[in-house]
């Protein structure tokens, strides 16, 4: 059974009240959604909050999934929209005084990974994610989203354009502009180190 057909079967079962099917759907996508959130928000705490919001939204709206697109595209679109909403809320809240504990979420203690990873592999993963997050933070949100969808979610430019409600050429331009910025920053970093 293909992943798409299996998703459809799990969705149907979850809609009929199967807690097992819902749990299996969540387990299938939670790591991907968390990592997408980590790359988009820049910290583990926000990524965890985003993941929870996404699955709560999916749970409440699963009956609205029509199957016109793949379930993975639908859930990543929800994650994208919630990340944009989260950024807007943070921007509005940044005008308010900040407490020192709000910055405590920048650690990577909660990075989703398989329990079977060896500590050295996990450390390498944490360091790589940290570098990726740092590099992506340099990009404007619209470019960061395109890089996320194209590079990490493997969507086509057509799917990205549809998801972002932009033209395919705009999606390509944002993606390649972002890559140039990342390459330039990476080269500067290597020169400085």
Image (cartoon, grey):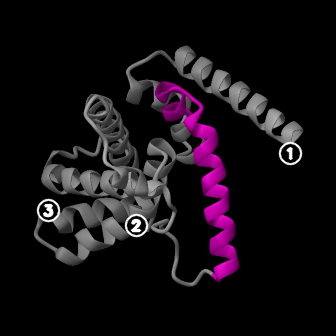
How far is the residue under mark 1 from the one under mark 3?
A: 54 Å
Q: Position of residue 74 (x, y in %)?
A: 33, 44
Rate crowding at label 3 as few (under 14), some (14 to 19) or many (20 or more) other CA atoms within 10 Å. some
Tell which circle, 1 or 3, labels the residue nearer the N-terminal end.
3
Q: Nearer the viewer, mark 2 or mark 3?
A: 2
Q: Nearer the viewer, residue 52 or 89?
A: 89
Q: Which residues are magenta?
A: 118-147
Q: Main secondary structure of the magenta part?
A: helix
Counting residues from the start of the chain, the first of labels 2 and 3 encountered is: 3
Q: Nearer the viewer, residue 119 or 55?
A: 119
> Alpha-carbon neighbours of circle 2 within 10 Å: few (<14), some, or many (≥20)?
few
Q: Is residue 149 above or below residue 62?
A: above
Q: Which residue has dot 3 on it?
A: 15
Residue holding disc 2: 28
Residue at label 1?
Answer: 193
Marks 2 and 3, how far apart at CA: 17 Å
Q: Is residue 146 left or right of residue 130?
A: left
Considering only order in the chain, which callout, 1 or 2, is on the residue closer to the N terminus? 2
Disc 1 is placed on an element classified as loop
Residue 73 position by quadrant: top left
Say how many tags the image has: 3
């Amino acid at each position: 059974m293909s992943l798409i057909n299996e998703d459809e079967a799990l969705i149907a079962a979850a809609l009929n009240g199967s807690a097992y099917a819902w749990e299996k759907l969540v387990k299938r996508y939670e790591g991907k959604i968390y990592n997408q959130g980590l790359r988009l928000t820049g910290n583990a705490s926000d990524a965890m909050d985003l993941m929870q919001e996404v699955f709560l939204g999916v749970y409440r709206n699963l009956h609205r999934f029509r199957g016109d697109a793949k379930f993975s595209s639908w859930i990543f679109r929800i994650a994208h929209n919630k990340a944009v909403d989260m950024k807007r809320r943070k921007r509005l809240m940044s005008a308010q005084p900040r407490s020192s504990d709000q910055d405590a979420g920048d650690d990577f203690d909660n990075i989703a990974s398989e329990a079977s990873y060896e500590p050295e592999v996990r450390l390498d993963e944490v360091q790589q994610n940290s570098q990726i997050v740092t590099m992506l933070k340099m990009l404007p949100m619209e470019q960061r989203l395109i890089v996320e969808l194209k590079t990490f979610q493997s969507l086509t430019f057509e799917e990205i354009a549809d998801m972002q409600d932009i033209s395919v050429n705009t999606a390509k331009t944002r993606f390649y502009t972002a890559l140039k910025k990342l390459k330039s920053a990476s080269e500067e970093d290597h020169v400085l180190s």
